[in-house]
Image: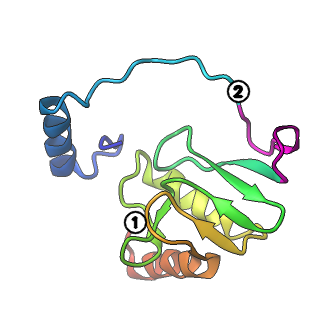
């Protein structure tokens, strides 16, 4: 989560790794998943009128779940702790931007991020436009 292949957030990454090591949270047990999901997979057989979206950026295997009604549950791709925005902690910032661009082409009404309150998708699109015009990201 705190390491980026493009070298971004080096100071934050180093501090986070040290703190996680000191409180013994830097190691995780491997596990075998019960279900493997793929991009575009429907979730009806599991009782959800929704489909899986592969949205890498924060991490390579990140997914979102888009309901038929247009609700997107998307973990850490965006955040909304002070305002809706693309997550600044991304393993590959180019993947994150591509995932947000992809979401802008889908019929999404509301975004439910892993951190913060839900928000209309238009607010995330505005953040991406602001980044593009300012040269950020």
Could you tell me which secondary element the residue under label 2 belongs to? loop
Could you tell me which secondary element the residue under label 1 belongs to? loop
Q: Earlier in the sequence, mark 2 or mark 1?
A: 2
Q: Any mark on residue 40, and which?
A: none
Which residues are the magenta region? 37-49
Q: Which image quadrant: the C terminus?
A: bottom left
Task: Give the answer, above or below, for where 91 lies relative to 103.
Answer: above
**Residue 82 within the magenta-colored segment of the rendering:** no
Residue for badge 2: 35
Residue 70: x and y in percent read: 77, 68
Q: Nearer the viewer, residue 92 or 14?
A: 14
Residue 102 in view (yes/no): no
Q: Quadrant of residue 98?
A: bottom right
Q: Which image quadrant: the N terminus?
A: top left
Task: Give the answer, above or below, for where 125 lies relative to 76.
Answer: below
Residue for badge 1: 137
Q: Residue at x 81, y 41 (%)?
A: 41
């Amino acid at each position: 989560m705190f390491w980026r292949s493009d070298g971004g957030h080096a100071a934050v990454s180093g501090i986070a790794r040290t703190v996680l090591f000191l409180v013994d949270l830097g190691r995780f047990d491997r596990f075998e998943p019960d279900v493997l999901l793929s991009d575009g997979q429907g979730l009806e057989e599991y009782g959800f009128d929704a489909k899986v979206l592969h949205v890498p950026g924060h991490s390579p295997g990140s997914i979102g779940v888009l309901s038929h009604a247009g609700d997107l549950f998307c973990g850490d791709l965006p955040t909304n702790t002070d305002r809706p925005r693309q997550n600044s902690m991304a393993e590959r910032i180019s993947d994150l931007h591509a995932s947000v661009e992809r979401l802008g082409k889908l019929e999404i009404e509301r975004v439910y991020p892993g951190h913060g309150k839900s928000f209309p998708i238009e607010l995330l699109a505005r953040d991406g436009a602001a980044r593009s015009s300012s040269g950020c990201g």
